[in-house]
Image (tube, grey):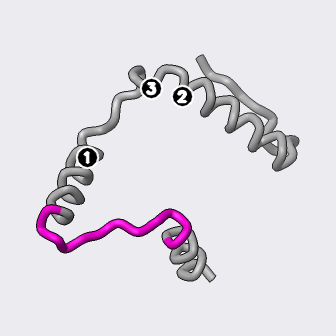
Amino acid sequence: MPFNLPLKDMSLHEKLSAMESLWEDLARTPEAIESPAWHKAVLDERRQRLVEGTSQFIDWETAKADIRNKLS
């Protein structure tokens, strides 16, 4: 069922609001969303690096700051 929004006529606020509404609706039934096989492969690889000690966690605020620094 195709669904068209007047994206060119929508403000940024309206677009973000529409995205939030869609996300909230999808989040109500997470079991209905199947992850692709490559997600498991990536998670398995990351888990293995943690076991081997070649990877580590950083807190979310540090991660966001690192991303901002790389993009600026």
Determine the residue positioned at 63% across, 83% down: 72
Residue of label 2: 27
- Number of labelled discs? 3
Numbered range of the magenta stretch: 51-62
| The N terminus - image quarter | top right
Q: Can you say whether 42 is above or below 68 in the image?
A: above
Camera-nearest label, 1 or 2: 2
- What label does residue 30 carry, if any? 3
Q: Amino acid at mark 1?
A: Trp
Q: Can you say whether 45 is above or below 3 in the image?
A: below
Residue of label 1: 38
Task: Estimate the x, y position of residue 50 in percent, counting from the top left.
Answer: 20, 63
Specify the quadrant of the image occupied by residue 8: top right
Asked if residue 55 is among those painted magenta in the image, a careful observer would answer yes
Q: Amino acid at mark 3?
A: Pro
Q: Residue furthest front?
A: 59
Determine the residue positioned at 29% across, 46% down: 39
C-alpha separation, residue under disc 1 versus residue under disc 3 = 18 Å
Q: Are marks 3 and 2 in contact (CB under 8 Å)?
A: yes
